[in-house]
Image: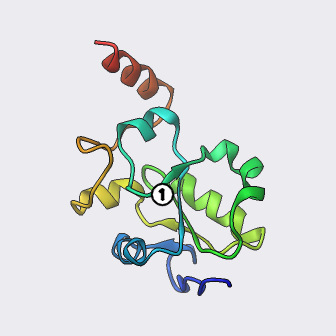
Amino acid sequence: MASERIDTEGTEHGGELPAEQLAEMLESGGLELIDVRREHEWEAGRIPGARQVEVNDLPAAAERLDRDRPIVLYCRSGSRSELAADALREGGFDAHALAGGISAWAGQGRPLEPEAGYVSESGEAAAALEARRRNT
């Protein structure tokens, strides 16, 4: 049976979900939470209950997503996840982006995994710095 669709009508892009609403939905379950960031960003810190599918891998992974459950995607600030949510909505999914991304989530003091998790910078330079930091 399909879950009730998420109403984000009237948000800036018609698909952004505030962190407060995501927190409530995570408590009740019934949604798929996808982190579209790169591996080094995921390893640094993520929202509990998320799974990682990098934004560039999402088209190939779409066939394995559940069309009967709402999907919430997030990235660092919301840009990549909004593009991904737009594409999934075009494909018939009930897809939404976390408004402000994981930065907004963490900025409100909400939990991250691992316990000492943090919001990593994105991009190639940041990935190199993260790798160097882990190796020291």
Direction from residue 4 to residue 103 in the image, left or right = left
Residue pointed to by mark 1: 78
Q: Residue at x 31, y 43 (%)?
A: 114
Image quadrant containing the N terminus: bottom right
Q: Position of residue 129 (x, y in %)?
A: 37, 21
Which quadrant would residue 133 be assigned to in this image? top left
Q: Position of residue 18 (x, y in %)?
A: 40, 73
Q: Residue at x 25, y 58 (%)?
A: 107
Direction from residue 82 to residue 91 in the image, left or right = right
Q: Residue furthest top?
A: 136
The count of marks equals 1
Q: Residues within 10 Å of mark 1 (few under 14, many from 20)?
A: many
As displayed, is residue 91 above or below residue 50? below
Q: Position of residue 93 (x, y in %)?
A: 70, 72
As displayed, is residue 117 above or below residue 135? below
Which quadrant would residue 122 be assigned to in this image? top left
Q: Residue at x 36, y 69 (%)?
A: 19
Front residue of 97/39: it is 39
Kind of residue sitting beneath label 1:
Gly
Front residue of 41/64: it is 64
